[in-house]
Image (tube, rainbow, N blue to C red):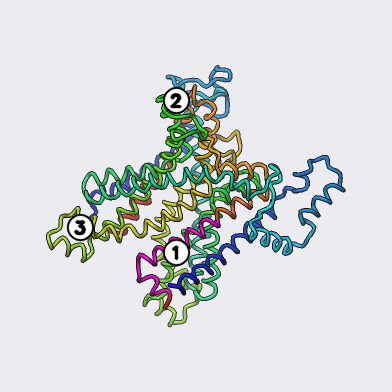
Amino acid sequence: MKARGFGKLEIIGGAMVLGLVVVAISAPLLAPHDPTRAVAATYGDPGAPSLVFPMGTDQLGRDVLSRIIYGARVSLTVGLAAMAVTIAIGVLIGLVSGFFGGAVDVALMRFTDVMLTLPALLLAMAFVAVLRPSLLSILLVIGLVSWTQVARVVRAETLSMSRRDFVLAAQALGAHPGRLIARHILPNVLPVVVVMAALGTSNTLLLDAALSFLGLGVPPPTPTWGRMIEEATIYFRTAPWLATFPGLAIFYAVLAFNLLGYGVLRARTQ
Amino acid sequence: MLVFLVRRIVFGIAVLIGTSIITFAIAFVIPADPAVTMAGAKADPQTLATIRHELGLDLPVYLQYARYLDRALHGDLGRSYVRRDSVAHLIASRFPATALLAVTAMVVSLVLGVLLGCIATAYRGEATDNALLIFSLALVSMPVFWLGTMLLIAGGLYLRSFPLGGFSGPSSLVLPTLTLALGSAGYYSRILHTNLSEAMDQEYVRTARGKGLSSARAMMQHAMANALLPLVTLAGLDLAGLLSGVVLTETVFNWPGIGRLAYEAIFNLDIPLIMGTVLFSAFLIVVANLGVDVLYAWLDPRIRLSEAG
């Protein structure tokens, strides 16, 4: 059962993520046109892909390729920041629950159970609708509905770690609970957290795209992949490419993080 | 078994109460004034006060919650502010369309997932296994609303074999089912592959192989029983999730289900309908959890014995 070419998975995934980051950062250099301006003289009709506009133009004459390149910025920002919120909440609840046990553990885990029964997308939609869509509200809401899995896994890891000899030894030497958690338990829980962060980002990216598609994403004129697909659905008979390319972009980004996370996970368990 | 069952039911009820509190809290922070929603922006203060009194909005919070809980237990989830119909009736009228789609999608995704998982495990470590791994990760990575739109373009527009949305006979079920099932199939195949691979390395499977059983038979007859267990849990919970409405797929295909209902409720800030759909969904998840636990205990005596002891 030696890793037989499986190291390739996380390398491919990592390279794809890196590519995405590069595109997002250097969007102004890479994008051939202004993503928010009409650059094609098509007057209300989407333009088919051509040499000048490789992915066509939308109903307002804006260049689809440029919008997708700029869209990487929003998607990556929301995806990563929401993942950070998810991990922060999940790790905190998991650590506290697993380390202190007893009534604290019971209370926190029952709360997690309740959160797990609530439909994440509906909950996110309701929150965003109430708070009004903005970059900040969206990434907070996504984090707020996605932390349960992280909390459960971190709690289980913490529970097994806090019974190990090296933790018990530190405890016997009089180490503070805060120090025990920060110096002895957290570093050992971290590898699992890294895997969950990679897989979690693919989830936050999908949730963000879904909210955008439902009209609850980062508001215009900022281009987002989800809203590009939503706007394109009216034209899917006459201009199917409009919905195709932004979807491929989401697919690419989600697949990148999935390959990375799954690759690391496999390498760890083999 | 009885102790186990009672314990699980009590736990389920506790979770539902917690869920109802959170749902109620959400409705409470929604800044829309129900009286204004119902009577219109130009209503005089007298009318608004009457409506507020009728809805019990002038009561203290805890009394409002008690009233809500009492009614919910009697199957009364309130009336939609916008649709002027009872929430329970609205959900019930949308349920058949959602249920039909959910059950078909679940069957298709399980069949596909188990098939893919078995093939991948049979070719463990070979090129086929790797290819299937990447294939299933690709299935999982596709945004559902995009996959739906693409299938609509391919199947409805180019092939002209399927209707472009709506609910009209068996052929209209094909594209939404595929949209929902492909992603889950990829997910299930990975889970099954992991479990099946683990089981294949166990002593009892090796013994069976040592006694001359072929690899395929050892997998299907011995390893499969253990590998399918975790899939039962997942599928049960996923089915509950599907039954409570699939917002994205129903939106793409204009499917008259609960997901569309919830989506419209959120956009209208129709509070009783939002609370109703969320609570209904939580109820299904709790029931599914209970069902899965019982099924599990029945299939695996170790669980019921350790829990009851």
Q: Secondary structure at mark 1?
A: helix
Q: Quadrant of residue B209?
A: bottom left
Q: Which mark is residue B157?
A: 2
User: Mark 3 falls within which chain?
Assistant: B
Q: Which residue is mark 1?
A: A154
- Labels 2 and 3: the sequence-earlier one: 2
Residue B80 placement, left or right of B203: right
Return the residue nearer the eye: B41 or B220. Answer: B220
Image location (x, y in percent) of residue B40: 78, 41
> What kind of residue is marked 3?
Ala
Range covered by the magenta-colored residues: B282-307
Image location (x, y in percent) of residue A225: 50, 36
x 45%, y 40%: residue: B143
Instruction: Residue B291: say if magenta.
Output: yes
> What kind of residue is marked 1?
Val
User: Mark 1 falls within which chain?
Assistant: A
Q: Which residue is mark 3?
A: B218
Disc 1 versus disc 2: nearer the observer:
2
Image location (x, y in percent) of residue B206: 18, 63
